[in-house]
Image (cartoon, rainbow, N blue to C red):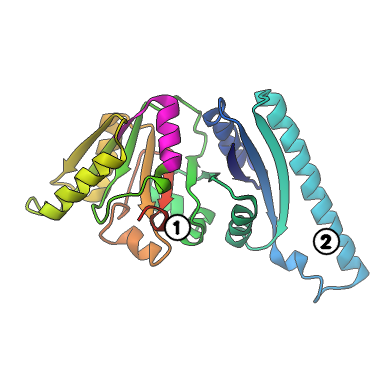
Amino acid sequence: MEKVLLPTDFSDNAWNAITYASQLFKDIECTFYLLHVLPPTLGSRKTLASRTTEEMLSSAETDAAKKLEELAGEIASLTNNNKHKIETVTRFDLFSDAVEDVVKDKKIDIVVLGSHGAGGIRDLFLGSNTSNLIGNVKCPILAVPKDLEFQEIDEIGFALDYEFAYRKEGLAPLFRIAEKFKAGIRFYHVMEKRDEWTGEKEKIKKEIEKAFEGFDISFFLLTDAPLDVATRLFVESREIDLLCMAAEKRNFMDSLLGKSPVKNMSYHSTTPLLVLHKDTLK
């Protein structure tokens, strides 16, 4: 049973991510948790304890719960899928804290949410809820670009830095997607120098091959282009349907802009991004 968290602010962008998730997990038994987060100040009953405030809080919570139930009904009517269950959750909290709390409480397998997807990784992350999630939530995160319609996943691109070999347990979300669609996994690494390849990296590559045994995989070394350009060209030339990378809580923004697979990454605006937390992969 897959447990999927779907944060929503009732926008078209959030709805698009929800419909994408319903198609992605169409043939899989799962529970969708629809989450709406209200500002934490609204929940400060201790400091705002007047009758008027209590009425405002109850009204906000009731209104959110009503909208979530209506949304759940729309999803059920749209998918008509008896393999899917839908539950609703409302929280007074900061967005990332609320998501982290629900992930732990419900033992969520993956978080799916909409992204702006306007033209690159900076637009996707910087100043967004997604950035905060990746910095604080170890659960896999699937960011779905705005207006993206679901398509079968044939090719998965995976950005490698060859710092370590990945454990199978942390790769489970990727395995499930690859198995469902019989998708090929294309690992790529961008070398800043042609002589960068070492025996240690060759060893890690062999360990990765072992972890992905049974899957259709191939490896690519890209040179003579900055990482963001190389990634864009790789995604477009290979017609990548899903881009995957690993990130970590510590110094994530430094990692985003530093020497890592996510440095200045610019990817096709119609390519969803699956982020796995490094702590779950080592």
For the N terminus, give its image quadrant. top right
Locate residue 126, reporting x and y percent.
45, 57
| Corner quadrant of residue 242 | top left
Residue extending farthest right: 51
Q: In this view, does 96 lie to the left or right of 9?
A: left
Residue under the point 28% across and 62% down: 258
Under circle 1, the secondary element is: loop
Q: Which of 242 and 209 is in front in this view?
A: 209
Residue extending farthest left: 195
Mark 2 — residue?
A: 57
Q: Give the range drawn in magenta.
A: 172-185
Residue 253 in sight here? yes
Q: In this view, does 165 lie to the left or right of 193?
A: right
| Corner quadrant of residue 39 | bottom right
Residue under the point 25% across and 60% down: 259
Residue 126: image tag: 1
Q: Does the magenta stretch include residue 113?
A: no
